[in-house]
Amino acid sequence: MPAIVELQHVHLSRNNEPLLHDISWRIEPGQNWALMGANGSGKSTLLNIITGYLWPSSGDVRVMGHAFGQVDLRELRKSIGWVSISLGDWFYSHHGDNTVLQVTVTGEDASIGAPFKGMRPEQRDKALEALKAVHMVDKADRPFRVLSQGERQRVLVARAYMANFQLLILDEPCTGLDIPSREVLLQGVAQLTQRAQSSVIYVTHHVEELVAGFTHGLLLDKGRILKSGTLSTVVTNDALSTAFQVPIEVQWDHGRPWARVVGETRVG
């Protein structure tokens, strides 16, 4: 199978300001990556290049074997799932009266703009299984509008279960969640990482969110790749301390990293 993502020597500048420098990154089917870096390191810019919303100044981009410039990006995006706080806010504003079950079912064809048109029995069964995985099946008939932020994020993860995605981007899905809500959401994320022929990119500032199932990591610093490879070789004391400009010590527990600050923060 072709690589899920293949970037070769990608550069991006805007208004003579360099945003990304010489990014080469390859994601194979079944690999699940953590994309990490401080604010302004280039994470969002890199995601927008992968999804075709930004075009690099130079370099080659292939997603699921398709070279950018030779593929209909609108069709390609149907194989890419994206879960983010902003998507939850969009559903809240535009389809908040739809039930949790109805919002979940829309994941099957990645529709977000079209009004809900009903569901087949097999879709309902699949959606209920997805909601069960994130502990939301008991709220299947509630309006999406009445959910807490954490519950909305869990529904969006369930919605991602419905899609036949090859690449799923989870863009800081735990932002604003308390510890219990975070852990329940991460249980659902762990199940998503088990899809054999697909891949997950999980964007975070917090390494403790990297539950079992994540295999690799990419750490950005000022638009450059600071470190890339298997997760245990990227989530290290030295690499994180450099990226976040604060002395960090990482401890691993049952395959999950936990970071703590061990000295004075450096500014600048």
Image (cartoon, grey):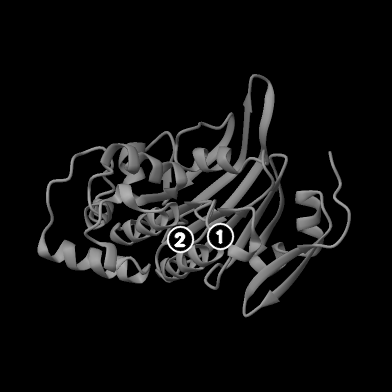
Residue 211 is situated, as x and y percent measured from the top left of the image, at 56, 70
Nearest the eye: 176 or 210: 176
Q: Secondary structure at mark 1?
A: strand
* Residue named by callout 1: 33
Q: Residue placed farthest to the right in the image?
A: 264
* Residue 130 visible in rendering: no
Gap in angstroms between the C-alphas marked 1 and 2: 8 Å
Nearest the eye: 5 or 218: 218
Q: Left of 91 or right of it: where is 238?
A: right
Q: Is residue 64 above or below residue 256?
A: above
Proximity of marks 1 and 2: CB atoms separated by less than 8 Å: yes
Residue 144 is situated, as x and y percent measured from the top left of the image, at 30, 50
Residue 95 is situated, as x and y percent measured from the top left of the image, at 26, 41
Q: Left of 235 or right of it: where is 65?
A: left
Q: Secondary structure at mark 2?
A: strand
Does label 1 or label 2 sit earlier along the sequence?
Answer: 1
Q: Is residue 264 above or below residue 182?
A: above
Query: Image point 30% across, 57% down: which residue?
Result: 163
Q: Quadrant of residue 204?
A: bottom right
Q: Residue placed farthest to the top in the image?
A: 15
Q: Residue placed farthest to the bottom in the image?
A: 254
Under mark 1, the amino acid is Trp
Local crowd size for mark 1, using a 10 Å CA cut-off: few (<14), some (14–19), many (≥20): many
* Residue named by callout 2: 199
Q: Quadrant of residue 91?
A: top left
Query: Image point 51% across, 31% down: which residue?
Result: 55
Q: Quadrant of residue 70?
A: top left
